[in-house]
């Protein structure tokens, strides 16, 4: 059932599991654990829809690299995954490996453990049972001559539930749990900390509604799924109030914050003949109803090892240039109709292309989520993000951009060039930074508390029943969108919690 905490007359609740956050992680975890017997409380700081009254509490200050939109979050069912694009992919095995050239790399999990959960995670992300039968449309990209061995053809999968409407994780909450007798969704409730302890176990958490009502929830397990910045903010506030309880996790708490270093790193100008061939290889395609692919390239593991690079991937976004009237001739309109019937994005005649890269970031100790003196309406200190970009991040951006630009020029598929300064490994102009909304690393997973905040089972170091499941636990991020990985980790965590019941 769904309950507005502002109208609840209950000051104390009993549960088996408390899950804080209704994004992809929280929804998956609740669904996996919902066996009709466990009492689950799913906590959401906002309401069913976005209410502007509560949104100022979702913003935090950016004090590092230029990142004007890094501060976006949402208090409402689904969180940031209310507007999820459906873009998924598996992390590469090299992403989880210990790499001598990447500081603090190496996961305490084997890649095979995540790969075994891929199909189940894809189903949670909305993909049909036979999603593997729709093969990526990479033939034309592979057929282009002269591709450097350092670049591998790559395809991102997207799943849409309707025309341009991707999975809204918040709506899944109301559909799955709206009439449930054992799952209670508490709206307009903010977790402010742990209420009671028994040795190294939390016995209860404190929730506060937006009208000041306090609710204590007793449970056996507590899981924080409230995002890559809000989760470390909550834990940092807890560490200040109860330093002894959080002593093991505190040294690395908030540290090694990462995003995908997403940059519009180059441009392509192509004539009519060039653009047709370019867009037939680098584009967006539909292989069957509802299943989309976007094609591009990624760095090979070999060049990452040989040249000491991070992982990275790139694609081309298109726009009409000033000669775009050619797209409205009878011939061009007929070609566009044919493309649409075959499920391809319509090809533009004269195009301008933006080469866009997602670069993995090196975990940097000084890149961090930290608390500032301002306090929110619940008395909790607000967060700032000091996001850093390392020389290795910039070198990977430079090398990958150069490989793509050089290849397009040698093929004669347009005039490609890198943004000024990128090939010299300088900081790109501020307008070239693109926010991915992939907030990673600030409660990183580790074997030892000296290197992270949670263990391989996502349990906060030093506390037996407090877990974290969000992008913030990823020790390194690879180049791929993290939602599928987060969902797989939620499935794995549900299995671990179920085994302890």
Image (tube, rainbow, N blue to C red):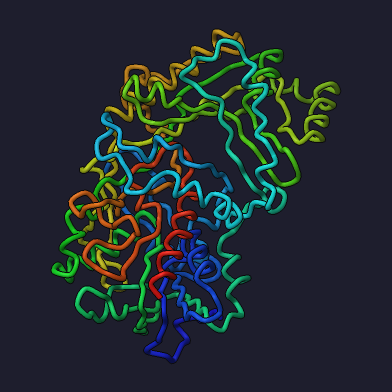
The C terminus lies in quadrant: bottom left
**Residue lying furthest left:** 244
Q: What is the x, y in percent for residue 233?
A: 29, 60
In the rendered view, tell whether residue 293 sits above or below residue 129: above
- Specify the quadrant of the image occupied by residue 317: top right
- Specify the quadrant of the image occupied by residue 303: top left
- Specify the quadrant of the image occupied by residue 68: top left
Number of numbered markers: 0
Q: Nearer the viewer, residue 217 or 303?
A: 303
Query: Residue at left 30%, top 58%?
Result: 232
Q: What is the x, y in percent for residue 94?
A: 39, 34
Left or right: 246 as drawn, with respect to 81 = left
Left or right: 371 as drawn, with respect to 488 = left
Query: Residue at left 61%, top 28%?
Result: 318
**Residue lying furthest bottom:** 9
In the rendered view, tell whether residue 181 sits above or below residue 109: below
Query: Residue at left 36%, top 72%?
Result: 222
The N terminus lies in quadrant: bottom right
Q: What is the x, y in percent for residue 71?
A: 38, 51
Q: Nearer the viewer, residue 407 or 381?
A: 407
Query: Residue at left 72%, top 49%?
Result: 163
Q: Nearer the viewer, residue 459 or 189?
A: 459
Q: What is the x, y in percent for residue 481?
A: 48, 43
């Amino acid at each position: 059932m769904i309950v507005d905490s502002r109208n609840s007359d209950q000051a104390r609740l009993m549960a088996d599991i408390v899950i804080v956050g209704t994004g992809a992680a929280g929804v998956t975890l609740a669904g996996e654990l919902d066996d009709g017997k466990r009492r689950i409380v799913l906590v959401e700081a906002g309401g069913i829809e976005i209410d502007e009254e509560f949104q100022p509490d979702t913003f935090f200050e950016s004090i590092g690299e230029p990142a004007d939109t890094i501060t976006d979050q949402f208090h409402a069912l689904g969180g940031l995954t209310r507007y999820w694009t459906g873009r998924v992919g598996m992390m590469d095995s090299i992403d989880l490996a210990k790499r001598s050239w990447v500081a603090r790399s190496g996961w305490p999990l084997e890649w095979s453990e995540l790969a075994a959960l891929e199909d189940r995670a894809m189903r949670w992300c909305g993909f049909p049972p036979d999603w593997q039968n729709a093969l990526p449309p990479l033939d034309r990209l592979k057929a282009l001559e002269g591709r450097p061995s350092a670049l591998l053809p790559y395809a991102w999968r997207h799943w849409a539930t309707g025309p341009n409407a991707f999975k809204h994780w918040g709506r899944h909450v109301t559909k799955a749990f709206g009439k449930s007798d054992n799952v209670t969704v508490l709206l307009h409730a903010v977790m402010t900390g742990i209420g009671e302890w028994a040795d190294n176990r939390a016995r209860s958490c404190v929730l506060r509604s937006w009208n000041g009502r306090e609710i204590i929830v007793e449970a056996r397990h507590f899981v924080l799924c409230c995002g890559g910045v809000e989760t470390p903010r909550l834990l940092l506030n807890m560490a200040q109030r109860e330093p002894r309880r959080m002593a093991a996790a505190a040294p690395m708490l908030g540290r090694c914050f990462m995003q995908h270093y997403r940059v519009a790193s180059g441009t392509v100008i192509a004539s009519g003949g060039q653009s047709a061939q370019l867009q037939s290889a680098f584009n967006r395609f539909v292989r069957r109803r509802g299943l989309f692919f976007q094609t591009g390239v990624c760095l090979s593991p070999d060049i990452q090892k040989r040249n000491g690079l991070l992982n990275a991937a790139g694609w081309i976004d298109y726009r009409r240039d000033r000669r775009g009237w050619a797209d409205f001739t009878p011939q061009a309109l007929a070609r566009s109709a044919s493309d649409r019937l075959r499920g391809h994005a319509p090809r533009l005649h004269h195009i301008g292309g933006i080469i866009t890269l997602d670069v993995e970031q090196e975990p940097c100790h000084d890149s961090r989520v930290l608390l500032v003196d301002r306090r929110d309406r619940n008395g909790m200190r607000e967060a700032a993000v000091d996001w850093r970009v390392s020389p290795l991040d910039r070198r990977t951006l430079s090398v990958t951009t150069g490989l793509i630009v050089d290849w397009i020029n040698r093929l004669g598929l347009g005039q490609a060039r890198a943004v000024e300064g990128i090939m010299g490994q300088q900081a790109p102009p501020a307008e070239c930074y693109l926010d991915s909304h992939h907030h990673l690393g600030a409660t990183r997973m580790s074997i030892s508390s000296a290197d992270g905040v949670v263990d391989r089972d996502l349990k906060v170091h030093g506390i037996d029943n407090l877990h974290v499941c969000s992008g913030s636990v990823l020790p390194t991020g690879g180049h791929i969108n993290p939602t599928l990985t987060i969902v797989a980790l939620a499935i794995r965590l549900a299995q671990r919690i179920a085994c302890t019941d």
